[in-house]
Amino acid sequence: MPGTLKCISPIDGTVFAERPVLSPTDAAAAVARARAAQRDWVARPLEARIQLVLAGVERLGAMNAEVVTELAWMMGRPVRYGGEFGGVKERAAYMAEIAPTALAPLAVEDSANFRRYIRHEPHGVVLVIAPWNYPYLTAINTVAPALIAGNAVVLKHATQTLLVGERMARAFHEAGVPEDVFQNVFLDHDATAGLIAARSFGFINFTGSVEAGKSIERAAAGTFTNLGLELGGKDPGYVMEDANLDAAAATLVDGAMYNSGQCCCGIERIYVAAPLFDAFVEKAAAIVSDYKLGNPLDTDTTLGPMANRRFADEVRAQTAEALAAGATALIDPSGFADDGGTYLAPQVLVDVTHDMRVMREESFGPVVGIMKVADDAEAVRLMNDSPYGLTASLWTGDVERAERVANQVETGTVFMNRCDYLDPALCWTGCKDTGRGGGLSVIGYQNLTRPKSYHLKRA
């Protein structure tokens, strides 16, 4: 008998939304409808698909006031930050802009004797399994280019943000995208694994934990299904001695604490050149001390609750272990409305080492450790001392030096003098346990299609 998915609000622990899951039979039927609808969808002119996708994005934007409040209730982000529509629109618009070039056939020869070229063929049905921390932004990264490329999309959203997929599908349907071409589904883990094992999809994009990513790979084993996996992260920042101190402190602290630290590419550890260390730490602690932890529906709140009690408990455990091992806490938790549950006081730690979990394992919460380093070599060694590799943030006035350091850092993206940003013109990718594949940019289209070669000999 099908079960029920429940979104428990971090605001007050109540059930904010619940939906019944599809039975395996109904789930298979949904995929079959998507597969059938995809044939007509890909037959539409590319420009027609682009315009429908952009219209769907605009319709979603018209819902933003409701979306912002829903996000606060579902995952705790303060309403003062206004939701995710700006980034959603930026990413979708860029992918629409480059689509005619990125999806154009690659001409090899068009002579009196031969016509040879490579087409970008859609995979067919794309499954998007989206996370709760940036539920619209992470979903649109694949939804928009997959539809533009001629795929049908089946979206399965995280239970914590249960209403997001439903709202996205409604917006796109109201804009004219056929209902079977873009479907939101409510599935449990077993039904999802069963569909994957049955080779239901041509491509699967998953954003989530390393363990969940492994379960996706196990389900897909032997099916040869194409996978895109964005998993864990422990992103570092490195402040060199010539950095703009004020900008580095303000940006890196924001990168560590925004969204209660629940960011895929959030800053989780900071390394500072010895001459700037004391001043940087002082500024970082002052910034964090000014945050207001509280109900995300209150416009004065700058730090909302974590999405789930167990996430907050993991951050508390890592912090307590670090303090017991000799770390020093710079923030007095008594100055915050920490309730021991989802509402968690932010913390800045010094005297930390890589023997502590808080400097090695993903925290995904409002805590950051800061270490002093002697030179670039030590910073690179520490930045690479991680099982993850999503982004790294370098702070210096010297571009050439930044590039030299960047060439040695094991990561998917390197920022100079900024952090915690996704540029749709660049490939969003990672290495090591962060995952495989890449989204957005021209490379995103390459992953959402397969090459098909044409070798035509003229009579």
Image (cartoon, grey):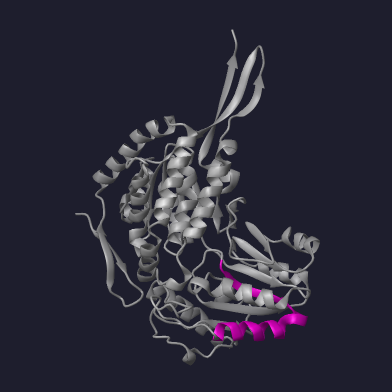
Q: Position of residue 168 (x, y in %)?
A: 37, 53
What secondary structure is the magenta-colored segment mainly?
helix
In the rendered structure, the answer to whether residue 331 lies left or right of residue 392 reads left
Whether residue 336 is situated above or below residue 178 in the rendered picture:
below
Q: Position of residue 245 (x, y in %)?
A: 71, 77
In the rendered structure, the answer to whether residue 127 lies left or right of residue 419 reads left
Range drawn in magenta: 266-289
- What quarter of the picture does the N terminus occupy? bottom left
- Which residue is most to the front? 62
In the rendered structure, the answer to whether residue 450 lies left or right of residue 406 reads left
Question: Is residue 191 at all visible to an observer of this figure?
Answer: yes
Q: Residue at x 26, y 51 (%)?
A: 22
Q: Residue at x 62, y 56 (%)?
A: 412
Whether residue 362 is situated above or below residue 2 in the rendered picture:
below
- What quarter of the picture does the C terminus occupy? top right
**Front one among 162 and 329:** 162
Q: Is residue 288 magenta?
A: yes
Whether residue 350 is situated above or below residue 264 in the rendered picture:
below
**Front one among 90 and 279:** 90
Q: Position of residue 63 (x, y in %)?
A: 37, 58
Q: Is residue 353 magenta?
A: no
Q: Residue at x 47, y 43 (%)?
A: 146
Q: Which quadrant holds residue 66?
A: bottom left
Q: Position of residue 398 (x, y in %)?
A: 79, 65
